[in-house]
């Protein structure tokens, strides 16, 4: 680590309160001391999407807080970013934040399932999938313990109205379709 650069823990401790007040949490901090000038990357996420204006506001706040530490002022490039779509979904909060998004799941039995994220509880994910026999969208309960890997898929067209309604509506277990 270059002289004068803070540690990952120091950056998190310094910025965490400011990000939390804005409704976001710091997922990771990456410090690249080999870059010239050194780079501090703060990865943030929250229940509401980080738009460009919010990222700019958080960047200014983070820069001001880091610049107040005399030993590092002006000796770094700061980047505030989101985790990106290629980050695997690994916790309940990740699935909650991805609600309505299309995902690909790898299940413990070796099968792959693609669908749209619906409600998540501690033990089950409701996934909107296409039922070709019924020619309609249904909710499939997927035990979270069976999910080996989950990744958001990039979409180039909007989902159908019915598919999105199922993903964002609160449903009871009695109305779920099962495949």
Image (cartoon, grey):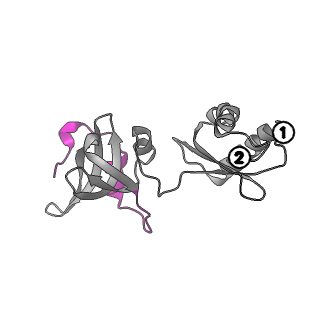
* Residue 15 screen position, x and y as percent: 69, 36
Residue in the picture at 25% in, 51% down: 107
Residue 48's quadrant in the figure? top right
Q: Is residue 100 left or right of residue 59?
A: left
Residue in the picture at 18% in, 38% down: 174
30 falls in the magenta region: no
| CA distance for labels 2 and 1 | 14 Å
Q: Is residue 6 left or right of residue 119?
A: right
Crowding near pointer 2: few (<14 within 10 Å), some, many (20+)? Answer: few
Q: Is residue 104 left or right of residue 141?
A: right
Q: Are marks 2 and 1 in contact (CB under 8 Å)?
A: no
State which mark lies toward you, 2 or 1: 2
Element at label 2: loop
* Residue 117 screen position, x and y as percent: 35, 49
Please give the residue where the numbered disc 2 appears in the rendered image. Answer: 1
Residue 1, relative to residue 174: is it above or below? Answer: below
Number of marks in the rendered image: 2
Residue in the picture at 31% in, 56% down: 115
Residue 20, relative to residue 100: is it above or below? Answer: above
Dot label at residue 71? 1
- N-terminal of the pair, mark 2 or mark 1, is 2
Residue in the picture at 84% in, 39% down: 71
* Residue 171 screen position, x and y as percent: 28, 40
Element at label 1: loop
Crowding near pointer 1: few (<14 within 10 Å), some, many (20+)? Answer: few
Q: Which residues are magenta?
A: 152-179
175 falls in the magenta region: yes
Q: Nearer the viewer, residue 40 or 79?
A: 40
Q: Nearer the viewer, residue 120 or 76?
A: 76
Q: Is residue 42 left or right of residue 65?
A: left
């Amino acid at each position: 680590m270059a002289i004068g650069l803070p540690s990952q823990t120091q950056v998190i401790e310094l910025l965490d309160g400011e990000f939390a007040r804005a409704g976001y949490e710091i997922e990771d901090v990456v410090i690249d001391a080999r870059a010239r000038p050194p780079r501090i990357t703060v990865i943030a996420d929250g229940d509401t999407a980080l738009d460009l204006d919010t990222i700019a506001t958080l960047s200014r706040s983070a820069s001001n807080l880091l610049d107040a530490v005399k030993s590092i002022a002006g000796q770094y490039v700061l980047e505030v970013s989101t985790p990106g779509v290629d980050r695997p979904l690994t916790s309940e909060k990740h699935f909650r934040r991805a609600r309505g998004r299309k995902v690909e799941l790898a299940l413990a039995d070796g099968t792959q399932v693609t669908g749209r994220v619906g409600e998540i509880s501690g033990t089950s994910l409701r996934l909107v999938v296409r039922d070709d026999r019924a020619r309609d969208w249904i909710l499939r309960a997927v035990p979270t313990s069976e999910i080996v890997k989950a990744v958001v898929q990039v979409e180039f067209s909007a989902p159908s109205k019915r598919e999105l309604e199922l993903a964002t509506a609160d449903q009871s277990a009695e109305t779920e379709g099962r495949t």
